[in-house]
Image (tube, coloured by chain):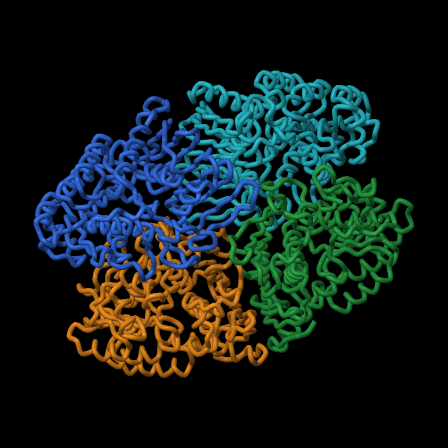
Chain colours: A orange, B blue, C green, D cyan
C-alpha cells in the first residue's frame, strides 16, 4: 500500500466520513489537519464541533461547506448524534488544546469512532493512562499526529537504523528550537501563546510539552531506542511565564546509548528548527525538519552522502510515503497527510476485517503515554535539581 | 482573498466541478494536478478523459472514485457530453503530452469551460497562437500551470523587485538542471522520457521545452522584464536523442538587463535544480526551488539576509499564498495548489460577474505563447550557430 | 595595531627569536605552530628541543634549517643554554603532550622567557595551579593557544555580545564533534591517539580534555560568561578506552544563563565540528568552525543575516585580525597565527616597557586553569552520576 | 614532495632569496604574496622595488625589515643590481598592475632570475606573446599565480577528472561574481578600483580580465579541456566605466564539451563567488571557492557525496598540498602559498639540475597567454555582437 501521486485514492473505495473537534475560526492546527486529511483523498469532512457554542460552530462550519445540522456546540453532542446517524462519522480529528484531548477522545472511542488526536496526548499522565485504558476498551483505532514521523527521510533513517546501517547506537542529539516566545506575547493575548503557557490547558510542560515531546518522539521513532532515565534543567526565562520555555535534558537509553535533548521557544533565529543526529559504531545521520527532503549519512570512514527523497538509495519505507519525484520538495503538510493516510489505510483494513499491512506506521496511544511521561519526568527532574528520573 | 490554512474553503461557497484530460494510470503529472486541486478544497473532480480509450479511462477513473459514466474515451466526447449536463464540469485540467494541449484546450474553451493547462502551452508556436485566438474568442478563463510561480518566496521576490528593492535590474541568472536523461533512457521505454524526447509529442525543444520554459517563465515572472532577443547553443549530448538535452542561452531584455539561462537534463547530481538570481543597482536576490521557503536578499553594501516564508519582512504577496507558519516547509504541491486556488478565485469572480482581485496572479495564455516562442527562438538561434534571434 | 596583509611586519622592528619544545618528526601540532608563527612574520625559529634525545632533535631541526648547536635533547638544557646566550630565544612554543606542559613552561618562565603553550594548560589541576603561580612569579608572558579564539568572526561575535547586540544572554549551545576515535585506533599504535587516550599523558579527560576544553573556552571567550556549575555524563564507548570519548554536559552560568556542551570523538561524519550558538533577549548567533568566515546573526523579530569577515557590518575586533578581503576564506592557520601575532604584539610592548594595547587579546593562564578545572569537574560530576559540581 | 605541516622546510636546504616588484604601502596583493611565500618557509624576502620612487620603496621596505640598500626605485635598477650581487635574489615576485608585468618580468628573465608573476599575464596579447618568447629564451622559470589552482579540492577534482571519474565531459559551468564595483567607486579614487578600470593599466578587459581569467583558468585546469571558441556579451553597467563589469560567455571546447562562464563585479551579495561545476557521462562535480575544503561529487545514479580535504577518498594530488587535517579549514592564503611552494620545488630541482617532480603543478606562461587570449576574444566577440571567435 503506497501513498503516491495519483494513486492516492479513497481508501477501500469510499472516502472515510470525518468529524472534527476544535479547529474553528481563529484556530491554527485545525486547518492543517483538514489539508492533511484532504491531500490524499481518503477522508471527507462531514461534521464538526468546531467551537464551544453551536452558533460559532455553525459559522465556522459554513466556511468549510459543512451541513449546519452537523455543526455541533460540543463534542459530547457530536459524539452522541453522529453515532446514531447511519451516515455518521467514522473517525474524528481532535484538535483542541491539550486538556480537552482526554474527554473528547474518550467520548468517541466509547462509541466505536476512530480517533485521530493531536499531540501531546493529554495534559497530564493520569489522563494519558485513562485514555489508554479507554482506547484498549474500544474497538476503534487511536492515531496520534506526531506528524514529523511522516516525513519520508525520517522513515528512511528509521529503516536504515533498523537494518543496521549505523551499527550499535551510541549517541543521539535531538533539538527543537523556536523563537516565537522570546518575549511575553502571552501577556498580549496572542491566542496560540495564551493556552500553550497556561498549565491548565497545556499541562505542566511548556516548551517540553509543546515541542520537546516532538523531539523525544522523533528520536524514539527513528532510533527504536527506549528511554531509561533523564536529567533535566528547565527554565522559564521570560518573566511571569508559568511554564518552561527552555529545556536542557540528558538522556540515557536502554542498551547504553546516551543523548541530549534541547527544546527552546526563546532562541532567536529559529523558526521550527527540529534537528536529529544519531551516531553509532558504523555511521552517523543528520536530518533537519526545515529542509526535510535531505538525509545526511556518513558510513564511518567513508564520505558523507546525501540521501534524498526518491533519490538514489532511498528505500522502501521512504518511497512508500513519497508522492512526487526527488528534487521537488515535499513539506510539512505532506508529512502530516501521511499520518492521515496511514490512518486511512488502517481504518480500511479494520473495516475489511483484515490485518493492517505492517508497512503502515503511525504514532500510537503508547507513544502518546510515553510523551506525557517524558514531560512529567522532565519537570520532576528539574524540580529535584536535575536528578536522574526513571521512566 | 487569502489562501490560508483552514480558510481554504470552497470558492464561492461550492466546489468547482472539474474534469481532467490525461492523467490515467502510469501518468505522473495528473496525480500532481489532482492533489493540487484538492489541497485548498476549491475543486471536486467529477469527470475524466484519463486515457485514450473509454475502457482504460474507466479503469483509471475507478481508482479515483469517478462515476464510470463520466469517464470518457476522448476529450472530444467529454467536452461534448459534459457541456450538455446540468451538473457538467465547469473547468478542465489538461495534463497530456504537449502536442495534445491545443486541440483539447480548444474543445473546452469553445464550450465555455475554463481550462487549466499544463505547460508548455503547445508543442509549436503555430498552435500556441491559434490557442490564444481560441481563448480570446471564448468567455472561459485559461490558466497555465507554470507551477513554480506559486511558491511564496517567488511571489515575495516579485513583489520586492516591483517595489524597487533591487533598483534597476542588470543581471539575471537562471538555470534548471536535472540528470535523469544523462543516459538514453528513452530507448529503454521509460514512459516519461519517451514522449518528452519525441519531437512530435513534445515539440522541437527537449530540455528547452520541458524545463527551459520553466526557467524562462520564472525569470520573467519575478523580474517583470520582457525578453528582447536571445542567442542559444543547444546540444543533444546523448547519442540518438532527437531533441536538445542541454541548452546554453544568452538573454537580452528590454531596458538593457542581460541574462544567462542554462537548462540541462544531463547534469549528474541535479534533481530539479531550478535557481534564480537577480541583480540590480541596489541589491541582489537568490532563490532555489529545492529549498523554496528561503529567499536570500542582499541590499548593496549591507549584510545578506534570509527572508523566510511568513518570517520577518515577508510581504503581502507571499503571505497571501502561505498556508502555515514559517519554519514548517511548504513544498512543490503547495505551490502547485496555489495555481489551482488562484484559478478558483478567478473562476469564482467570473461566476459572480465580478472583477478578479488584482492580488490573484496566475500564468496566462500570453505567458504560454511567450514560452513556446522562447523555445522556438532557442532552436532557431542554435541552428544559426548561436545568432541573436528577436522575440 | 592591526594584523593585516602586507603590514604583518616584524614586531618592534625585529623578529622575535623563538624556540620550540616538542614538534619533531612525526608530530602534528608543532608544524601548525611553526606556520602560525611564520605567517605574519613576527617570529624567527632559532632553537628547539624537538625530541627527547639530542640526536633526534638535531635531525628534526635540520629539516627546519636550525643550527645543530641549538637543537637540544631536553627542554631543561635548552632553557639553560638559551638563557645564557646573548642571542638566546626570547620566547618558546611548547607543543608536547599535556603532561609536559607544566615542567617545560616552568623552566622557561623562571628564566624570563615568554611562553606560548598548547592547550590544555596541563594534565591536572594541581599542575595548572602551580604553573599559574610560576607565571605570576615570572616577568615573562604566558600565552595559551586556544586557537579558535583567533577566528575573526569569533572576535566579531564577542564584540557584538559585549556591545549588547544579543541583550541578556539566556542560552549557550556549544559542541565539538569528531569521529576519528570511533574505533580503537589507539590499540593499533596511532601516535596521536595513543597519547591522547593515555591518562598519564593527557590527564583524566579524553574528549573533554582534548576538545571539550576548546568548546568551553570558546563559549566563555565569546559570551564573557562565567561558569558556575556543571553536570556531566561522560562515556568511553570504545571498549578498553581509558578516557572518555563522549561527553554530555549541562552548564549553569553566573547571572542565570544556561548551556549545553557536547564533545565527542565517536560521531561519524564529523571532522572538527566545533559549533557555537548563543541566544539572548535581543537576538541569536550561530557560528561554526568548519566554515569560519560566516557568522549568522538574528536580531529578534528581524531577518537572519550573514555577517562575513571584512563584509558589511564587520566590526573593529574582527577587522583587526583579518588579513584579506571578505570572500577569500581565512582558515585555521590564520586563526592560529593571530594568537601568535597577538603574542608578538604583547611581547613587543613588554620589551618597549609599554602597556599592551587593549585591543590585543589572547588566552591567558587563567583561561588555562579554568579549562583544566572544567575537565576535572566533568569527570567528578560524571563519577557522581551527573551531580552538579561547582567551579 | 609534499607540502605538509611541519615538513614545509627550506627547499633544497636553504631559503630562496626573493625580491618583489610592486606591493608597497597601500597595495593589496603584495601582502598576499609575501604571506604566501612565507607560509611554507621556502622563501626569504630580501629586496624590493616596492614603489615607483626609491624613497617610497625604502619606506615600504622598512616595514618589512628589508635592508634599505636593497629597496630600489625601479625594477630595472633592482634587476641590474641584484643580478650582480653574489647574494642577489634568485626569484622575483611581480605584483604590479597588469601593464607592468611584461617589462618587469622580461628584465628579470633576461638576467636568469626566476619570475613569479601575478595574473593576468599582461595587459594585452602582444605583450603576452613577447613575454612568452622572453621566457623561452631565458633559462629561468616562469610561474603565474593563478592561485585558485592551489586549492587542494581543485587538485582533487582535476585528478578525479583525469582518472575518468566523470566520464566524457559534456558541460562546464563556471562563474566568478563580486559586487564591489556595483557603484562607480573608481570615480571616488579607490585605488584598487582605479587601476582595474583603466584600460591602460588593466587591458581591454575589466571583469573579464580581473576575474574572468581566473574562472577560465580554473575551468581549464580542472577539466583539462582546450577552449576552441567563445561567444561573449559584455557590459559596462556602471555609467562612465571604461571596461566591462559583467560578462556572459558561451564556451565550446575541443572534443564537444560546452560551457558557460559568467563574471561580474556588479552582483550585490557576492564577495568572491568563484564556482565551478562540471558534468560528464558518468558524474558531476561542484566546488566553490568561498568554502573551498569541500568538493561535491555525484557518480551518476548514486548519492551525492562530500569529498573533504584530507577526508575519506581524498587522493594524492589533494593530500600532497594539504597542510592540516580535514575539518580544519585551509583558505585562500594556503592555496596561494601552494603556488609558491610548487615554485620553490621547481626552483630547487632547477638548481640541482634535476627534472621537476611531475607531481609539482603550477600555472605556466602558456596558461597566461591563453588567459590574455581569452580576454581579448571576449572583447572581440562582444564587439561583433556575440559572434563566435576562435582561440
What residue is drawn where x is 25% and y is 58%?
A: B41
State the residue in front, C158 or B113.
B113
For residue A363, above or below residue B166: below
Left or right of D249 on screen, residue B138: left
What residue is drawn where x is 36% and y is 54%?
A: A330
For residue D280, above or below residue B69: above
Asked whether the viewer can see residue A53, the reply is yes
Expressed as whole percent of the image width and height from the top left, the position of residue B322 reads: 37, 54
Expressed as whole percent of the image width and height from the top left, the position of residue B288 reads: 42, 45
State the residue in front, C283 or D257.
C283
For residue C282, above or below residue B229: below
Q: Quadrant of the N terminus of chain A?
A: bottom left
Left or right of B19 on screen, residue D380: right
For residue B129, above or below residue D73: below
Expressed as whole percent of the image width and height from the top left, the position of residue B257 reads: 44, 31
- Counting every numbered tag in the picture gives 0
Q: Seen from this angle, which residue lies furthest front?
A: B354
Left or right of C94 on screen, residue A73: left
Expressed as whole percent of the image width and height from the top left, the position of residue C192 reads: 65, 56
State the residue in front, D236 or A43.
D236
Asked whether the viewer can see residue A141, the reply is no
State the residue in front, D189 or D245.
D189
What residue is drawn where x is 20% and y is 44%?
A: B115
Q: Quadrant of residue D190?
A: top right
Amino acid at each position: 500500500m503506497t501513498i503516491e501521486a495519483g494513486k492516492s485514492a479513497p481508501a477501500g473505495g469510499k472516502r472515510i466520513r470525518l468529524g472534527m473537534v476544535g479547529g474553528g475560526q481563529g484556530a491554527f492546527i485545525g486547518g492543517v489537519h483538514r489539508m492533511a486529511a484532504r491531500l490524499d483523498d481518503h477522508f471527507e469532512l462531514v461534521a464538526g464541533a468546531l467551537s464551544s457554542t453551536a452558533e460559532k460552530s455553525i459559522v465556522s462550519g459554513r466556511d468549510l461547506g459543512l451541513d449546519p445540522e452537523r455543526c455541533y456546540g460540543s463534542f459530547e453532542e457530536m459524539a452522541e448524534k453522529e453515532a446514531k446517524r447511519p451516515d455518521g462519522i467514522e473517525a474524528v480529528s481532535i484538535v483542541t488544546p491539550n486538556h480537552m484531548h482526554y474527554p473528547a477522545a474518550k467520548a468517541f472511542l466509547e462509541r466505536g469512532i476512530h480517533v485521530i488526536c493531536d499531540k501531546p496526548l493529554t495534559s497530564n499522565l493520569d489522563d494519558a493512562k485513562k485514555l489508554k485504558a479507554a482506547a484498549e476498551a474500544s474497538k476503534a483505532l487511536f492515531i496520534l499526529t506526531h506528524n514529523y514521523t511522516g516525513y519520508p527521510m525520517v522513515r528512511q533513517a528509521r529503516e536504515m537504523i533498523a537494518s543496521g546501517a549505523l551499527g550499535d547506537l551510541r549517541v543521539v542529539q535531538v533539538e527543537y528550537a523556536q523563537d516565537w516566545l522570546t518575549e511575553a506575547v502571552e501577556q498580549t493575548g496572542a491566542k496560540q501563546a495564551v493556552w500553550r503557557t497556561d498549565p491548565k490547558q497545556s499541562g505542566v510542560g511548556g516548551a517540553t510539552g509543546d515541542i520537546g515531546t516532538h523531539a523525544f518522539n522523533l528520536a524514539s521513532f527513528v532510533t527504536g531506542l527506549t528511554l531509561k532515565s533523564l536529567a533535566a534543567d528547565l527554565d522559564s526565562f521570560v518573566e511571569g511565564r508559568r511554564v518552561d520555555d527552555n529545556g536542557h535534558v540528558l538522556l540515557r537509553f536502554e542498551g547504553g546509548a546516551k543523548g541530549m535533548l534541547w527544546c527552546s521557544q526563546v532562541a532567536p533565529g529559529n523558526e521550527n528548527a527540529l534537528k536529529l543526529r544519531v551516531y553509532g559504531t558504523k555511521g552517523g545521520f543528520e536530518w533537519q525538519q526545515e529542509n526535510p527532503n535531505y538525509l545526511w549519512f556518513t558510513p564511518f570512514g567513508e564520505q558523507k552522502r546525501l540521501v534524498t527523497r526518491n533519490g538514489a538509495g532511498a528505500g522502501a519505507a521512504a518511497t512508500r510515503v513519497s508522492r512526487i519525484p526527488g528534487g521537488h520538495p515535499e513539506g510539512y503538510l505532506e508529512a502530516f497527510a501521511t499520518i492521515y493516510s496511514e490512518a486511512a489505510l488502517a481504518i480500511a483494513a479494520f473495516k475489511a476485517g483484515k490485518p493492517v499491512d505492517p508497512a503502515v506506521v503511525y504514532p500510537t496511544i503508547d507513544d502518546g503515554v510515553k510523551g506525557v511521561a517524558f514531560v512529567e519526568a522532565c519537570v520532576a527532574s528539574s524540580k529535584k535539581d536535575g536528578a536522574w528520573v526513571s521512566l
